[in-house]
Image (tube, rainbow, N blue to C red):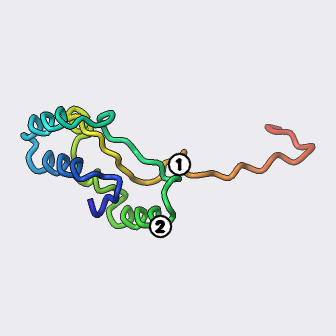
Amino acid sequence: MAHHGPSLPYDTAWALTSLRAAPGDTAFVRAWIRENPSNSPGIHRDHWNELEPAEQQRRLRWLQRHGGHSPVELLGLDPSLIQSAGLHVLDWGRPRTADISQPSPPPFPRGSSQGS
């Protein structure tokens, strides 16, 4: 949780580490999830452009130190196991192109024709 940041709740961290330590406990995690349902199961990404610059820098430093993998990815759990267990995990990684504001390309100069 300390490495992932505030977007990973304690109970989700517990369930992930339980699955990592003892994959046979999947039924136990599923039973817990039925009693404590979460939003849509699976791994979901947060939005890079909504993060504070300090958090973006923290994450970039982490990714550089760990080969581009988020803390959840480093657990090495199969995403289908996370989904089938019913966990909703908000993960992060490198910013997706859609999450980074891209400058608009300059307009074509007047009189030039595109494709000529």
Image vertical order of residue 7 relative to residue 62, above or below: above
Residue that badge 1 annotates: 99
Mark 1 Cα shell of 10 Å, populated few (<14), some (14-19), many (≥20): few
Mark 2 Cα shell of 10 Å, populated few (<14), some (14-19), many (≥20): few
Q: Amino acid at mark 2?
A: Ala
Residue that badge 2 annotates: 54
Residue at point 8%, 41% (across, down): 25
Q: Looking at the image, which residue sits at the far front?
A: 35
Residue at point 28%, 63% (across, down): 2
The image quadrant where one finds the N terminus is bottom left
Q: Secondary structure at mark 1?
A: helix
- Between 4 and 33, the residue placed more toward the observer is 33
In the rendered image, residue 54, in percent from the top left (x then y), is placed at 47, 67
Q: Amino acid at mark 1?
A: Asp
- Looking at the image, can residue 79 be seen? yes
Number of the label disc, if any, that sits on residue 3: none
Image vertical order of residue 63 relative to residue 110, above or below: below
Instruction: Nearest to the eye among marks 2 and 1: give it.
Output: 2
In the rendered image, residue 10, in percent from the top left (x then y), is placed at 23, 53
- The mark that comes first in sequence, 2 or 1, is 2
In the rendered image, residue 63, in percent from the top left (x then y), is placed at 38, 61
54 lies left or right of 74: right
Image vertical order of residue 8 relative to residue 81, above or below: below
* The quarter of the displayed image where residue 41 is located: top left
Q: Secondary structure at mark 2?
A: helix
- Between 33 and 66, the residue placed more toward the observer is 33
Residue at point 12%, 38% (across, down): 26
79 lies left or right of 54: left
Separation of residues labelled 2 and 1 (CA atoms): 16 Å
- Between 80 and 33, the residue placed more toward the observer is 33
Q: Looking at the image, which residue sits at the far right?
A: 111
Q: How many marks?
A: 2
